[in-house]
Amino acid sequence: MSAFDKLMAFQRDTQALGQIAGRLGWDQETMMPRGAASQRGDEMAALEAVLHARRMAPQVGDWLEQAKASDDSGVAQLREIRRSYERAKKVPADLAKKLAQVTSGAQGKWAAARADEDVSAFTPVLQEVVELKREEGAALAAGGNLYDAMVQDYEHGTTSAQIAEIFDAMRPRLVDLRATVLERPTPKRLEGVFDEAKQMKLTRKLAKAFGYDMNHGRVDKAVHPFSSGSGQDVRITTRTSASDPFSCIYSTIHEVGHACYEQNIDNDYLLTPLGCGVSMGVHESQSRIYENQLGRSRAFTGWLFEQMVDVFGDIGVADADAFYAAVNSVHNGYIRTEADEIQYNLHVMLRFDLERALMSGDLQVVDLEAAWNDRFKADFGYDVDKPSNGCLQDVHWSVGLFGYFPTYSLGNVYAGCLHQALRKSVPNLDQQLSVGDTSGAVSWLQKNLQQHGGLRSPLETITYAAGSQPTHEPLLEYLETKFGDIYNL
């Protein structure tokens, strides 16, 4: 057996163990008894210790020196294994284990503090997470920028300065568009009480309509919707609200975008570094194009309106045009995941700036709530009413995902580029969507992006699919055109 074959066999076992760790995380959010949190933390820490040891095992380094790739995918496999190996060597095993243990427990404490609207109950463990992440960042940065080192875990090849440049270019036009739209009359909203069991039934139908393979997945409920797994076992979660069915519908479509990316990767890459999404920004491009450019389009919402009436009866809007306006209503709100397309990126920019300040030490954890509330008031013009609508609304910081937030807006930028290319390649797209047929869109995405997994770098992945390097212009042009039409600007 060649060094390459030995390396890949070892790597498949490592990937399999990583999938088991992910399944434990899924269970913690969906099925696990609340009282099991402490034991689960120990289980996750033990598994992380095994994974960390495998990722930096001396034989991996030996095999990397000896291995020869015979094709482009082999070259990419070696590139990704080497990147993971070099990262793992920089982080002490005790620190990796401690992070897994603390973040597992912090997740439960965040959920409880969020339910009780009690920031002070979460602050001590968040302080511990931040300190551990700073320690990890220092190890990874080796004298460089701590936050940049963290970003590499989610969007390798991108720096915080590059992200800030994109955000700075987007912000003025988004702020202007938001202000102009909010001066217009607000579209009529849906009315009624929407049975949550019926929502879940409809949402499973929508998942299948967007190509989600239920033979290799499932839909459950969680506080914070997410997608988990890759290859032959890819699960999603959603949430329901009796007064707001859109929360369930569009959370589901969003997570289906993530899940379909994972399900549609070439089976030859199963349980290898190429067998998952190449970055969180690229991953988010799939969830956002499914949710927004497809799911919130005039054509698709015309079909969705009929489905809603069939399931719920009178929903408070008279026709498909009014329903389209309701789906895309721009209005004040606190929650990032429920924000309209115009304001969503402003929510992300807030978090990007705050977490950079936390990591640099310019912002202390004890001052986070006040800093969040001040920034929110400055950006959105009104006060945060309660912590669950403010600094406690997201799970990310509790589990140590610093550097993750900016990839949400990078995903929107990438989705804008992909949508522009998709429209050129599938000229009858609206005709298909108007009857609930997403096959033209999802087939194009599968062929041009999803099947390739981690074969190319994030930037190369989007450039290959879209036909040119990504910029923010297609996204802003799409937003200005779409909302200009809805609000008669």
Image (cartoon, rainbow, N blue to C red):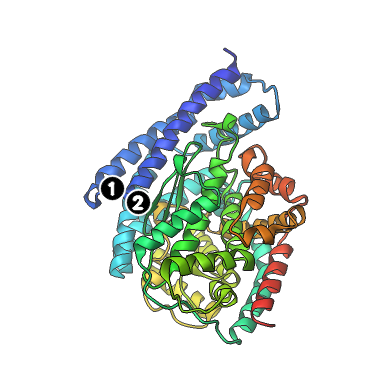
Closer to the camera in the image, 36 or 439: 439
Q: Position of residue 382 (x, y in %)?
A: 48, 83
Nearest the camera: 347 or 224? 224
Going by the numbered disc 2, the residue's amino acid type is: Glu
Are the residues tagged 1 and 2 within 8 Å (C-beta)?
A: yes
How many dots with numbers? 2
**Mark 1 vs mark 2, CA separation in Å:** 7 Å
The residue sitting at 66% across, 51% down in the picture is 440
Viewer-closest of 156 and 131 = 156
Up/down of 153 relative to 274, above or below: below
Residue placed farthest to the left in the image?
Answer: 35
Q: Which mark is residue 32?
A: 1
Amino acid type at image mark 1 = Met
Can residue 33 be spotted in the picture? Answer: yes
Q: Position of residue 4 (x, y in %)?
A: 60, 20
Residue 157 showing in the rendered view: no
The residue carrying mark 2 is 29
Q: Position of residue 145 (x, y in %)?
A: 58, 52
Which residue lies most toward the top here? 1
Residue 184, image x, y percentages: 61, 86
Split into 4 quadrants, where in the image is the C terminus?
Answer: bottom right
Residue at the image position 43 percent from the left and 68 percent from the top:
245
Determine the image quadrant of residue 1.
top right
